[in-house]
Image (cartoon, helix red, strand yellow):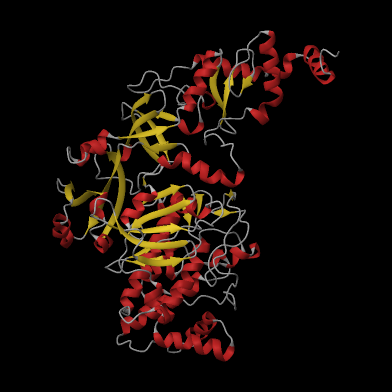
Amino acid sequence: MELLPKSLAITIFIFLTIRFSYCEGDNSEQYYFTICSTNKQLSCGDFKNLPYPFWGESRPEFCGLRDFKIHCGDNYHHPVIQINGLDYLILNVSQSNDTDSMTLARSDLWDGPCSPKYVNTTLDHNLFRFAPTVGNLTLIYKCQKQLHQEFVSHGYSNFTCGGDGGNVETVYYANDSLVSNLGGSLRACGNVIRVSISKSTTGLVGVKEALKEGFDVEYDHRFRMACGACERSGGKCGSNVTTSRFLCFCRAGSAEDSVCPSHSGIGLFSAFVICCFKNKVLALMSTKFWANLTDKNDQGLEDFIRSYAYLNVQRYAFSDLKKMTKSFKEKLGQGGYGEVYKGKLLDGERLVAVKVLNASKGNGEDFINEVASISRTSHINIVTLLGFCLEGSKRALVFEFVSNGSLEKFIQNDNRSETTPSLEWHELLQIGIGIARGLEYLHRGCNTRILHFDIKPHNILLDEDLCPKITDFGLAKLCPRKESIISTLDGARGTIGYIAPEVCSRNFGGVSHKSDVYSYGMMILEMVGGIKSIREAETECTQKSGGYFPDYIYKHLEADSNLTPRGVETDEENEIARKMIIVGLWCIQTMPSDRPSMTKVIEMLEGSLETLHIPPKSFMSTPITSSPELQLTNSSFSSSAVSN
């Protein structure tokens, strides 16, 4: 009888005869152990021992995790951590069995909210999440004085900045429940930012005190748990600075994925197995959380389920949605991704639109895209996401209710009902500017650049004041601000007629935020085309010559022909029409580099017609044609850094 299988005997023989240096590191890894041992204590301000994964000052990066760098500010008694480009003071660090958290306060608001950076409080949701105790406060700056009474009547509080011989400014603030009441009035204010505070301070202290109290942010306690296991095995906690992967530096010079090996026979054999198979079996930890060992097609949703608490939105049960909508009684519309119903929040005070997504949309990419992207935003021209539902195959999104519906029904004759009023030219211009501001915010105002990929009239909602709000982020992509080109995008995405050339073929350039500019330009031309005589010109162009409408407009502009729509009574309205056409033609230039940024578009629309020049005719002679609502089947992509 064979006592040992031949293969196992050979394995043990090899194990007993090889040098164990295979499992040992070099002197550099011994150096890491020594440095992380002697620099274990990290003191900063009033903090005498900041624990792993924090690093900075005398503790090098390989003794912590990349995104937990702190520095000691000269003007504060607190360590400072940077998240999404903003500096935060760490007021407290708390560790328990299942949760690690820190209390943060924005450094730019520490001495008062009068000189802030005009950006929202956001987190890197891969690493941090807002604690349940966190609420939001909206600060509104540089408003026209005549709005004071309106703000006060809606329950807004205010304080003053400046004085002592300088300019005095009144700043207004309110919580989320009040902000929606103002609608279009916020457009008359220069800056609106959303900041986080502790709910416990709401109404009890002034805004300055609330900002100094800070708010709680949670991070994964498994960082600390892994470090504890490492140190109990005699190691020191650290990371690979290239991959940001957790490492346990050992006295013998090795760097392990979890714990240091013991020196018993069994321990050595275990160490051998770990060394041989660690890259395949034990690569469990990274700063971007642990991979979920589920079926590949469900990976995105599983990750989302695990980390939804990082999003500052409410999660609802499907039964809650049925109550909100009275069993989905009033249908507002239907799109390629599902149906939209009118409802009311359970407190009975706020109207909402509930978008129930089709259960047949594959791995839920559109659902994840929409929640992950829109939850990062807070802007008057972006629809507000209030919550979501993820319950088995049931997926739904809860938005603010926008009373006038989509722009599409206002500008397309075949969609306009008898009760839908026509838009005046000055209203069209303001709507165009509002959409441009929303896109500018997505491209530049967020800490993470958001590319929408489906700008069209159907995805623009108008409130009671005709303030436009961009919606439907199902095809959106997130891109770090320093990286503006998506180098890998498998297939086209968007809607026929609005898709930028480079989205369909890389021969035209890289896919970037300029792809949204193209879609915006086509929409602006369609807004102009919604006026009767222009629409008739489009029909005549298509029917008689089979031509492309931008070609037709360009030729008439170049010849200085009269494209003035029927019913225009003033030179101002004629100037608006011509201005919108020229801007639209600039936006649909074939090469992305020839298109203006959304910041430039706003400047052009708000400036005078005399400063605008007709662009060279470099747009395509035929529109990009493809199947409606093209989209990616593979959501992964990589980005390469280029200049903006």
In the rendered image, the quadrant that contains the N terminus is top right
Q: Which residue ends up furthest to the bottom in the rendered image?
A: 544
Residue drawn where x is 31% and y is 30% of the image: 75
Q: Is residue 393 visible?
A: yes
**x and y, in percent, of residue 172 in the image:** 20, 51
Q: Number of marks in the image?
A: 0
Q: Give coordinates of residue 107: x percent, y percent.
A: 32, 37
- Image position of 512 with respect to 313: above or below: below
Residue sitting nearer the eye, 45 or 358: 358
Q: Can residue 111 be spotted in the picture?
A: no
Residue that appears at 24% across and 54% down: 348
Say which of 251 and 367 sits in front. 367
403 relative position to 482: left or right: left
| 499 with respect to 423 (left or right) | right
Answer above or below: position of 269 versus 439. Answer: above
Q: Nearer the viewer, residue 572 or 541?
A: 541
Relative vertical location of residue 391 with respect to residue 441 in this rendering, above or below: above
Residue at screen point 56% across, 15% down: 235
The correct choice, above or below, for 27 with respect to 389 in the image is above
> Residue 169: horizontal and vertical position, in percent?
19, 52
